[in-house]
Amino acid sequence: MQSFRDEVAQRFRAVQDHICAFLDAENGVRYHEDAWTYEKGNGGGRTRVYDGGELLEKGGVNFSALTGASLPASAATAFHIPEGTPFFATGVSLVMHPHSPLVPTIHLNIRYFEAGDVYWFGGGVDLTPFYPEAPMVAAFHRTLKTFCENAGRDYVAYKKLCDDYFYLKHRQEPRGVGGLFFDHLRGPRETELAFVEGLGRLFPDLYRPFTQRRGEPFTTAQRDFQLHRRSRYAEFNLVWDRGTLFGLQSDGRTESILMSLPPLCKWIYGFKPDPGSAEEQLTEYFLKPRDWASM
């Protein structure tokens, strides 16, 4: 009889396949896959990387399922799980860095943990645009709100958690225009699994409207601004992201963990956008928590 953890891993692998089928079609170039094993325990994963194509400058869709001897502190704090507790962790995580500054970067993650007698689910999705259009951002949030309402979930609470989590404290600014974030879901396991699996399968509907802009012309100045904003993305992932910390603390596969970083970015000293410009509008209007779904 299949164990619950094996069922989760099987359904998460299917989510990875579902997302990659969409991206293969949008990008025009198929991913290349690295299958790897977890050297500090059992299990492993499939890292699928997009390196060029019509849409993506770099992208990755990771699946992993592994067991280890001791849950890292970055994952154990909420439940005060003692050091030395064996764990099982499985998940799907993706980050897409498009060529065009008119198409946003997007991140999605779904995950499941077991440690001793404790289990929990987590996940989320967030959007990081460079030259956003308000109707498209509002539609993105309405899609998430409808998804949550159909699943009996609190969109407002999950949106606030996202706004709070994807925040660069050292810059005092959000990473993007938000989305959903949730962790430590411990309701009936089949119900929680269906919810996070559903979020993973929603990805094509969330990202497809934005990918349609990939063929629009853009300027060198817009490309430079994209690279500047990507530096903020890199800073968050290296300084604040718990998933990155968990992967490194668990001695996971470094290439897969750092797959989320952009291929190119710029750190421009003391950058200030021109008054009234689209670049200023990003930071002064879009990078403020808003009730987008009601717009």
Image (spheres, rainbow, N blue to C red):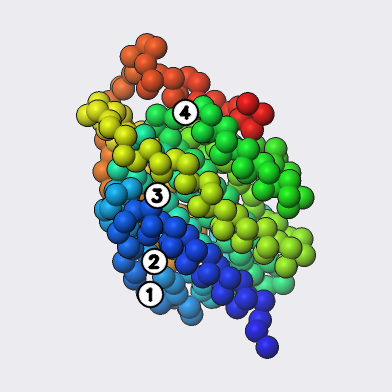
Task: Quote the CA–CA distance across marks 2 and 3.
Answer: 14 Å
Q: Which mark is residue 96?
A: 3
Q: Which mark is residue 133?
A: 4
Q: Nearer the viewer, residue 24 or 86?
A: 24
> Element under label 2?
strand
Precedes in sequence: disc 2 or disc 3: 2
Crowding at mark 3 (Cα within 10 Å: few <14, some 14-19, many 20+):
many
Task: Quote the CA–CA distance across marks 3 and 1.
Answer: 21 Å
The amino acid pointed to by label 2 is Thr
Question: What residue does disc 1 label?
Answer: 36
The amino acid pointed to by label 1 is Trp
Precedes in sequence: disc 4 or disc 1: 1
Task: Quote the CA–CA distance across marks 1 and 2.
Answer: 8 Å
Precedes in sequence: disc 1 or disc 2: 1
Q: Are marks 3 and 1 in contact (CB under 8 Å)?
A: no
Crowding at mark 2 (Cα within 10 Å: few <14, some 14-19, many 20+):
many
Question: What residue does disc 2 label?
Answer: 47
Precedes in sequence: disc 4 or disc 2: 2
Task: Quote the CA–CA distance across marks 4 and 1.
Answer: 40 Å
What residue do we see at 48% from left, 80% from top? 42
How far across and how far down the image is residue 41, in percent?
48, 78
How far across and how far down the image is residue 248, in percent?
43, 60
- The quarter of the image holding the C terminus is top right
What residue do we see at 47% from left, 19% from top? 284
Pair 3/1: label in front? 3
> Element under label 1?
strand
Q: Are marks 3 and 4 in contact (CB under 8 Å)?
A: no
How far across and how far down the image is residue 11, in percent?
58, 70
Task: Quote the CA–CA distance across marks 3 and 4.
Answer: 19 Å
- The quarter of the image holding the N terminus is bottom right
